[in-house]
Image: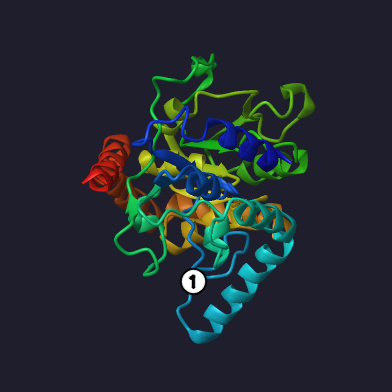
Amino acid sequence: MLIHRVFEISAISHKTLLPPTFQAFCPVLRYGGSTVADFLKIPFVTASSALVNGFDNTIPPAFTTWKYNPAWWARLRNRLGYGVISRFSQPIYKVISAYRQKYGMPACRNINDYYSVSKLAIISQQPAEFEYPRHDLNGILHFTGPHFDSTGRKTIDFPYEKLNDKPLIYTSMGTLQNRLTHIFYKIAEACVGLDTQLVIALGGGLATQALPNLPGNPIVVKYAPQLELLQKASLTICHSGTNTVLESLFYGVPIVAIPIANDQAGVATRIAWSGVGKFITPSSLTINRLRQAIQEVLTQPSYKENALRLKTAIQKAGGVPRAVDIIEEVISNRLK
């Protein structure tokens, strides 16, 4: 297991390669990162590039489409959901616990201790308006907004000359769970007759030849200049991956989501909760339901208004400079 190798490297480097003021930067949902930091006796900050974590029973688990509800029965439901995560994670927990015992570290007390959940600062690239009310992480949870820019991205060729004046619907199912050809066909069929222009980015998972004769003759490319197209888009259809969703909201684009895996269900519920769009699970996806969702999000002003509201929130959140300030503040406070 990778975690074994991480501990071996950490043991070798302990007190020899790392200066005493070294600041670890752990991505959330990476088992053992906080344990490695504890072993090296260095502080760490959690970077949450997906949904913010910290397993709070008032927040539905990210793998579900359960609605947020502060009622007691919903908290019980959520607790049972987190219990499922813990049960499937037991083999990893045992490895982490063995290393903590071997090196004389205190035992993990809860699920957050096994994950890389910092007690100093958690930096989320969500805006606060795209997260349910939380009280478990007061004082250490910071919503800085997305941490992306266009400068580090490769230039991608795109047939801009094919774009017309119709409202643009940009579709991406990400770069991982993007081989479900039947979903692309349903999206294309659902857009027929809507007086829009559909662009489908395949994310490298399929060749354009894998989707012949798509209804409505959409523009289909293996990769797309996503940020540039989102600036022109009226709607995003996506898998509710965090990056695509936040980039859409960065430009004030409402969303219709089809969550596939991982935390995408939790992102999808936040899309609906924040009023920036709608979602349909793959099991209930039909052409008619998808067409109705597209029409509703395109034509009801509230979705665009809420997307613009979150755009403003993102602009005010601070982004990368704010995240850097938080990290430097944590380091400064630790050195006092």
In terms of secondary structure, where does tag 1 sit?
loop
Foreground pick, 92 / 10: 10
Residue 141, quarter of the rendered image: bottom left
Taking 90 as reference, is 130 left or right? left
Between 231 and 134, which is closer to the camera in this rendering? 134
Q: Whole-percent x and y of residue 194?
A: 56, 44
Toward the viewer: 269 or 275? 269
Count of marks, rendered view: 1
Among all residues in the image, which is located at the extreme bottom?
A: 72
Say if residue 212 shows up in the picture: no
User: Which residue matches tag 1?
Assistant: 68
Res. 288 in view: yes
* Residue 329: x %, y % from top left: 24, 44
Closer to the camera in the image, 63 or 118 = 118
Q: Quadrant of the N terminus?
A: top right
Q: Is residue 177 left or right of residue 111?
A: right
* On screen, residue 185 above or below 256: above
Type of the residue with mark 1? Tyr
Q: Residue 80: where, in percent of width, then height?
A: 64, 75
Can you give x and y, in whole percent of width and height, for residue 223 in the image? Answer: 60, 23
Display coloring: rainbow
Number of residues whose C-alpha sits closer than 10 Å to that of mark 1, classed few (under 14), some (14–19) or many (20 or more): some
Residue farthest left in this picture: 336
Q: Residue at x 58, y 43 (%)?
A: 238
Residue found at x 47% / y 20%: 153
